[in-house]
């Protein structure tokens, strides 16, 4: 296990020009923020060098979304969809069983079904069908008269299956965002901003985001009001947050407006999940999506059937939606218990194998009895705890199938690809790859995977390093700063929440242990100027309380949060990430 390391970002010497109080009232906030060296640095670290650029960042406009027809293959895709609808062909909307796939299927199906009735959707079973498209699903589609399949968030490597579908008279439109193989499938059209040579201006769309662009183009080609699609942006925002794609460019625009939709008039299924989570009447944030809404949608595909998640997201009756949300919530409870159990088993196995503090640079684990729907989470847990690339496999339909996760800066896709001759199938991203192989290949895969990682990973990539944006004095933390934090939302990769450090702080006298099991610290602290006392919460750091109580000086690393329970107290508090003595 590795301790956190913190690096202070380089600080440029930005000029600041304090304005008079009268000017402060009249000048736009985007201008005032550049008067503060701290806020100016945070903006410039995001490439925002002028008030005009900052204002555009603070208020993303849907009009700034790119023309969907800039995506190669879009005209062909729209023409084939129009042809199918004009000829009354049967259409199947097909997608992956995770959050991105199910939201994508819900969006495309729900939008098109407003105009067309010969359309249905299908989510593969993680255990019966496996990842992606399978021949028996294609056979079933052919038997029911389907001649066009729109496949979302998967399909980019389904060369054999799509070639087989063509022999049965079924065309495919692929809407994917995963890395393509050397050869592309013989689909009618492939919409994927990551394709080699793609000229689309933004390459980081989620699978649901690609589906949204497809529907944008369909609406435009048929003279339909595009603003109607704005009502589906809550689904896109959920997919972006859950799939952890960069929160920049089009993703930031769609998430910004999708969160507004979540807070004002959400999809009926999402509204039901929010009710189950106790989020009704509260402001929904990206954190709520990542930690509460997304896991429940995901739990459906992990524990039971991803189709149930789509059933929920396309529900038209509030009572029906609530009943489905309650089922999904139960799946999530089961998922949590299995997650804890399997993670503990995996750690015990690593300890028994002597790998906890071994020089090995990667983790590969196989247990044929582990639950297929949980092992991706377990791989993430192992990567977080031991800070090594991790592959976790279980037995599914006769194959060792599973997931891998990586550490910051290391391309695990290339590592898995280096063992391609041992694999039956694989696909994914730089930091997460799904894979399957014959069980007899596991030993050789483990050896070769370890060798590749050892030869290509750097020492720095094996140590968790977190960045501090800048040092602050407590006197600089005020309501203007809190408002600035709000306007930087939504946060995510490429636009992380700013992290601050204050040196030489001390207990102001009223810090105390809190929590049901006395595991947290409620801090009241002052910095070395002694001019101000501020509140902070340090979760799971109670072991450091004796040092605080002794009056020892320490450094605090934190984010600035709104204190929603402040009542008559201060409306902000610090959320502690590290206490350093």
Image: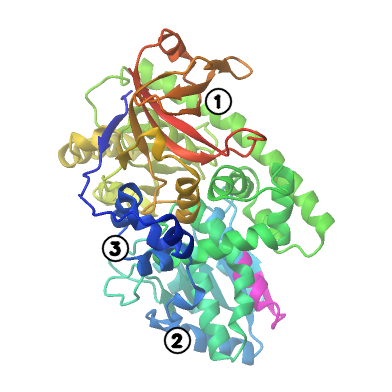
- Mark 3 and mark 2 lie on one chain; the one further toward the N terminus is 3
Residue 413 percent coordinates (x, y): 30, 51
The magenta segment: 106-120
Compared across the picture, whether 69 is left or right of 528 comes to: right
Q: Secondary structure at mark 1?
A: helix
Which image quadrant for residue 518? top right
Q: Nearer the viewer, residue 143 or 27?
A: 27
Residue contact between numbered discs 3 and 1, judged by CB atoms under 8 Å: no
The residue identified by callout 1 is 341
Q: Tag on residue 516?
A: none
Q: Is residue 168 visible?
A: no
Residue displayed at 48% across by 56% down: 487
Q: Secondary structure at mark 2?
A: helix
How far is the residue under mark 3 from the one under mark 2? 40 Å
Compared across the picture, whether 7 is left or right of 367 comes to: left
Which image quadrant for residue 40? bottom left
Q: Tag on residue 76?
A: 2
Quadrant for the N terminus in the image: top left
Q: Residues within 10 Å of mark 2 (few under 14, many from 20)?
A: some
- Mark 2 and mark 1 lie on one chain; the one further toward the N terminus is 2
> 104 above or below 580?
below
How far is the residue under mark 2 from the one under mark 1? 48 Å
| Front disc: 3 or 1 | 3
- Mark 3 and mark 1 lie on one chain; the one further toward the N terminus is 3
> 308 above or below 514?
below
Residue 439 percent coordinates (x, y): 39, 38
Quadrant for the C terminus in the image: top left
The residue identified by callout 3 is 49
Q: How is the image coloured?
A: rainbow
């Amino acid at each position: 296990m590795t301790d956190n390391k913190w690096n202070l970002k380089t600080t440029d010497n930005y000029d600041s020009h304090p304005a008079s109080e009268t000017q402060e009232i009249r000048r736009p906030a985007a201008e005032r923020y550049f008067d503060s060296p701290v806020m100016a640095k945070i903006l410039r670290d995001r490439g925002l060098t002028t008030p005009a650029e900052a204002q555009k960042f603070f208020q993303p406009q849907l009009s700034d979304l790119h023309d969907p027809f800039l995506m190669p293959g879009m005209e062909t895709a729209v023409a084939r969809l129009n042809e199918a609808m004009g000829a009354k062909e049967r259409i199947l909307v097909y997608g992956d069983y995770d959050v991105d796939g199910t939201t994508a299927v819900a969006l495309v199906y729900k939008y098109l079904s407003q105009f067309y009735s010969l359309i249905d959707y299908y989510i593969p079973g993680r255990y019966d069908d496996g990842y992606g498209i399978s021949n028996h699903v294609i056979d079933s589609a052919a038997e029911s008269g389907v001649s066009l399949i729109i496949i979302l968030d998967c399909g980019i490597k389904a060369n054999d299956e799509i070639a087989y579908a063509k022999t049965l008279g079924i065309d495919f439109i692929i809407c994917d965002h995963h890395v393509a193989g050397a050869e592309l499938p013989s689909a009618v059209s492939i919409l994927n901003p990551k394709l080699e040579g793609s000229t689309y201006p933004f390459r980081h769309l989620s699978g649901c985001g690609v589906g949204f662009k497809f529907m944008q183009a369909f609406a435009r080609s048929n003279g339909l009001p595009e603003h109607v699609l704005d009502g589906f942006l809550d689904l896109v925002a959920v997919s972006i947050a859950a799939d952890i794609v960069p929160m920049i460019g089009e993703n930031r625009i769609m998430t910004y407006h999708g969160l507004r939709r979540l807070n004002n008039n959400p999809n009926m299924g999402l509204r039901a999940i929010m009710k189950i989570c106790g989020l009704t009447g509260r402001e929904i944030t990206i954190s709520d999506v990542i930690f509460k809404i997304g896991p429940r949608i995901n739990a459906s595909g992990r524990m039971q059937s991803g189709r149930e998640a789509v059933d929920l997201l396309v529900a038209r009756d509030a009572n029906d939606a609530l009943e489905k949300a309650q089922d999904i919530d139960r799946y999530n409870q089961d998922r949590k218990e299995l997650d804890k159990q399997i993670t503990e088993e995996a750690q015990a196995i690593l300890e028994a194998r002597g790998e906890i503090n071994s020089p090995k640079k990667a983790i590969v684990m196989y247990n044929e009895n582990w639950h297929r729907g949980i092992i991706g989470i377990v791989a993430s847990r192992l990567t977080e705890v031991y800070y090594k690339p991790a592959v976790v496999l279980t037995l599914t339909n006769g194959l060792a199938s599973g997931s891998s996760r990586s550490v910051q800066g290391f391309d695990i896709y290339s590592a898995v690809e280096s063992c391609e001759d041992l694999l039956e199938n694989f696909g994914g991203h730089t930091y997460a790859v799904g894979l399957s192989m014959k069980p007899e290949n596991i030993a050789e895969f483990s050896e070769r995977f370890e060798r590749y990682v050892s030869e290509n990973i750097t020492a720095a990539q094996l140590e968790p390093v977190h960045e501090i944006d800048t040092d602050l004095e407590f006197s600089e933390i005020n309501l203007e700063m809190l408002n600035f934090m709000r306007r930087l939302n939504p946060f995510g990769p490429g636009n992380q929440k700013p992290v601050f450090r204050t040196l030489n702080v001390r207990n102001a006298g009223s810090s105390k242990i809190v929590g049901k099991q006395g595991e947290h610290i409620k801090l009241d602290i002052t910095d070395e100027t002694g001019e101000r006392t501020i509140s902070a919460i340090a979760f799971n750091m109670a072991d450091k309380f004796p040092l605080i109580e002794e009056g020892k000086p320490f450094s605090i690393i934190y984010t600035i949060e709104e204190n929603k329970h402040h009542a008559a107290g201060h409306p902000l508090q610090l959320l502690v990430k590290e206490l350093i003595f």
